[in-house]
Image (cartoon, helix red, strand yellow):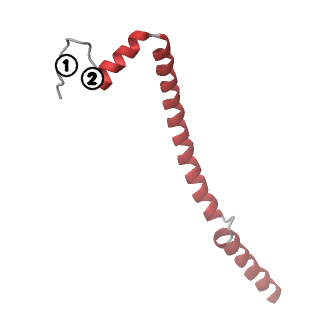
Amino acid sequence: MKLAKKYLIALIAFVVIIGFLDTNSVWNRLEIRKVNDSLRQEILVYEEKSRRDSLRLDELQKNPDAIIHVAREEYFMKRPGEDIYIIK
């Protein structure tokens, strides 16, 4: 009976140490997994943004009308003799 109590105490101590106190504990692994999942989602967002920006860059390099469009729409540039009206 005393031997069974020793094993039970050792087992409980082992579970507590491995489950909560160790640097590789189950608790830390769950936290790391949560952070990892959020970082993977962020990677997907940035990959999509990179893909869209690459397509836009290709369009700007191949099409001079696209450069004019960007200059007029985003930077409010104008040709001589034109007036620009900004409506918000």
The residue positioned 39% from the left and 10% from the top of the image is 65
The crowd level at tag 1 (other Cα within 10 Å; few <14, some 14-19, many 20+) is few
Q: Are marks 2 and 1 in contact (CB under 8 Å)?
A: yes
| Vertical side of 15 occupied by 9: above or below | below
The residue positioned 55% from the left and 39% from the top of the image is 43
| Vertical side of 11 occupied by 2: above or below | below
| Label 2 sits on residue | 76
- Which is more toward the observer, 50 or 24? 50
| Vertical side of 7 occupied by 25: above or below | above
The residue positioned 60% from the left and 56% from the top of the image is 32
Instruction: Name the image quarter holding the N terminus.
Output: bottom right
| Label 1 sits on residue | 84
Seen as rendered, the residue at the extreme right is 3
The residue positioned 28% from the left and 20% from the top of the image is 77
First in sequence, mark 2 or 1: give its number.
2
- Which is more toward the observer, 85 or 52? 85
